[in-house]
Image (cartoon, coloured by chain):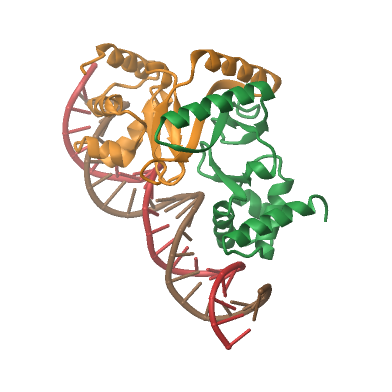
Chain colours: A green, B orange, C brown, D red
DNA sequence: CTCAGTGCAAAGGATTTGCATGCCG
DNA sequence: CGGCATGCAAATCCTTTGCACTGAG
């Protein structure tokens, strides 16, 4: 056991709000994602905790996503990746390798970030969209795929 | 409106550069994408031009992507979407509906856009990544999905 | 003629689902 | 006890591929 006992509480609360339980399988998934430095594919999640079963992992990640606990991202390969929701960690962006689909995190200068935020708010207001958030990815080649 | 005959020439040139031909099937796909206001799924492309066959559409879009003529994007649903490459149109961003996966285009104030560009360049330089471009999406709900 | 491009049908593969069983509340 | 969660295996469905044929050069 380690850090952030509060994370578990927030997660439990969000699940409860959706009429869902914070079962041990879901707990283990959240634990894996918390330790990860970047979004993980489901095979990676399964590899990180062999006691998880594939179908339950898929099912539980879908439920955790609905509960607003995790976010699903899709890059260039055939695997979806999951990470903890931004408000459970910190706002950040992704460096995506266009060759292998792998992902690394990065952040922007706060000043620029808030300019961006403001501009996007205006865009959303002018459109018929209800904005929920934004996503900024830097696309390139990772060292391995260079 | 009519036409940009020059678009065809650029496309032909890029295909030739990769040792590929600009066949009629590929020509029809490019025509469909040129008319579209937003990225299209392959079913949408096929519906727009019934003379296209599914497997060739998949194959040709993959080839057009390699040739740098189109870009493949993935949103939240199960369908990949394609649009003409940015340098064949104009740099723009996407409003993505998190419910149905549909996409609309938008642009940013040029000043902000270039600040962003600069910042991302720095990020890339500091990482072990070779930057190829960036992607900024606004995620929300479209009018239809609420 | 040759070989890339095409279309059909069948295969591939990540993700989803049916069903019987186990466990939390 | 009742119902949701789980795990296995089978089904789903977008996408890819094998193969025979056609057409451009």
Inspect this view and state whether residue A50 appears. no
Q: From this view, report whether residue B42 is shown above or below residue B124.
A: below
Q: Position of residue A69 (x, y in %)?
A: 62, 51
Q: From this view, report whether residue A139 is shown above or below residue B102.
A: above
Residue B54 found in image quarter:
top left
Q: Nearer the viewer, residue A112 or B30?
A: A112
Q: Residue furthest right?
A: A2
Residue C18 found in image quarter:
bottom left
Q: Position of residue D8 (x, y in %)?
A: 56, 69
Q: From this view, report whether residue C18 is shown above or below residue B143.
A: below
B128 sits left or right of C20 in the view: right
Inspect this view and state whether residue B117 appears. yes
Quadrant including the C terminus of chain A: top right
B70 sits left or right of A68 in the view: left
Residue at the image point whose x is 63% and y is 18% from the top: B119
Q: From this view, report whether residue A20 is shown above or below residue B56.
A: below
């Amino acid at each position: 056991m380690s850090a952030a006992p509060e994370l578990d509480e927030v997660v439990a609360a969000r699940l409860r709000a959706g009429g869902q339980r914070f079962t041990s399988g879901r707990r283990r998934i959240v634990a894996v994602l918390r330790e990860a430095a970047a979004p993980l594919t489901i095979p990676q999640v399964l590899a990180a905790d062999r006691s998880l079963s594939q179908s339950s992992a898929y099912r539980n990640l879908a439920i955790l996503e609905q509960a607003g606990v995790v976010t699903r991202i899709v890059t260039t390969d055939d695997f979806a990746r999951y990470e903890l929701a931004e408000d459970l960690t910190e706002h950040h962006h992704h460096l995506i390798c266009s060759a292998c689909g792998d992902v690394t995190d990065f952040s922007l200068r706060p000043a620029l970030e808030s300019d961006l935020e403001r501009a996007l708010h205006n865009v959303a207001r002018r459109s018929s969209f209800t904005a929920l958030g934004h996503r900024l990815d830097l696309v390139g080649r990772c060292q391995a795929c260079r």
